[in-house]
């Protein structure tokens, strides 16, 4: 997570991108439970139900505290534009079919 935070702060542009199938599975479950919806652009958006669930996790205090802290920091800095830049960096370095 530190490397992603550094990337979002423009401290370090050398980021390793990995595609973890667990993320897709988690998104499938989140959609199935109504926590997120996929928008026509392909992006995912938290629903009111998802926001409520996230608030309940925060209220617990010690549940996912590190993840909440890191993701809260990232949410302010890792914009769609910055994510597109990350994808472009990855494509330039590693994509076979450009």
Image (tube, rainbow, N blue to C red):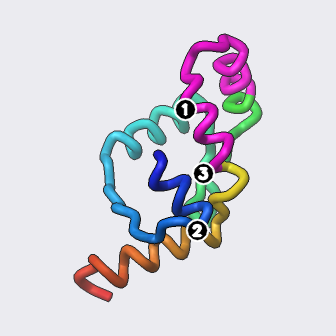
- For the residue labelled by badge 2, is the local secondary structure a helix, a strand or a loop? loop
> How far apart are labels 3 and 1 at the CA level?
19 Å
* Mark 3 lies on residue: 44
- Furthest residue to the left? 96
Q: Earlier in the sequence, mark 3 or mark 2?
A: 2
- For the residue labelled by badge 3, is the local secondary structure a helix, a strand or a loop? strand
Specify few, some or many for label 1: CA neighbours under 10 Å numbering under 14, 14-19, or 20 or more.
few
Measuring from the top left, give residue 39's x and y in whole percent.
Answer: 64, 57
> How far apart are labels 3 and 2 at the CA level?
24 Å
**Residue 67's mark?**
1
- For the residue labelled by badge 1, is the local secondary structure a helix, a strand or a loop? helix
Measuring from the top left, give residue 80's x and y in whole percent.
Answer: 64, 66
Residue at left 23%, top 82%?
A: 96
Q: Earlier in the sequence, mark 1 or mark 2?
A: 2
Q: Is residue 31 a member of the stretch shown in magenta?
A: no
Occupied quadrant, residue 54: top right
Instruction: Tell me: 16 left or right of 47.
Output: left
Residue at left 55%, top 28%?
A: 66
Give the extent of the magenta segment: 52-74
Measuring from the top left, give residue 7's x and y in whole percent.
Answer: 52, 63
Residue at left 59%, top 13%?
A: 62
* Mark 2 lies on residue: 10
Residue at left 40%, top 64%?
A: 15
């Amino acid at each position: 997570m530190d490397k992603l935070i550094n990337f979002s702060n423009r401290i370090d542009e050398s980021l390793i991108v990995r595609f973890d199938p667990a993320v897709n599975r988690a998104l499938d479950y989140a959609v199935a439970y109504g926590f997120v919806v996929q928008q026509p652009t392909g992006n995912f958006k938290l629903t009111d139900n998802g926001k409520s669930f996230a608030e309940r996790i925060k209220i617990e205090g010690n549940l996912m505290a590190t993840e909440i802290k890191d993701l809260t920091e990232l949410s302010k800095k890792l914009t769609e534009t910055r994510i597109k830049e990350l994808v472009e960096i990855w494509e330039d370095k590693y994509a076979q079919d450009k």
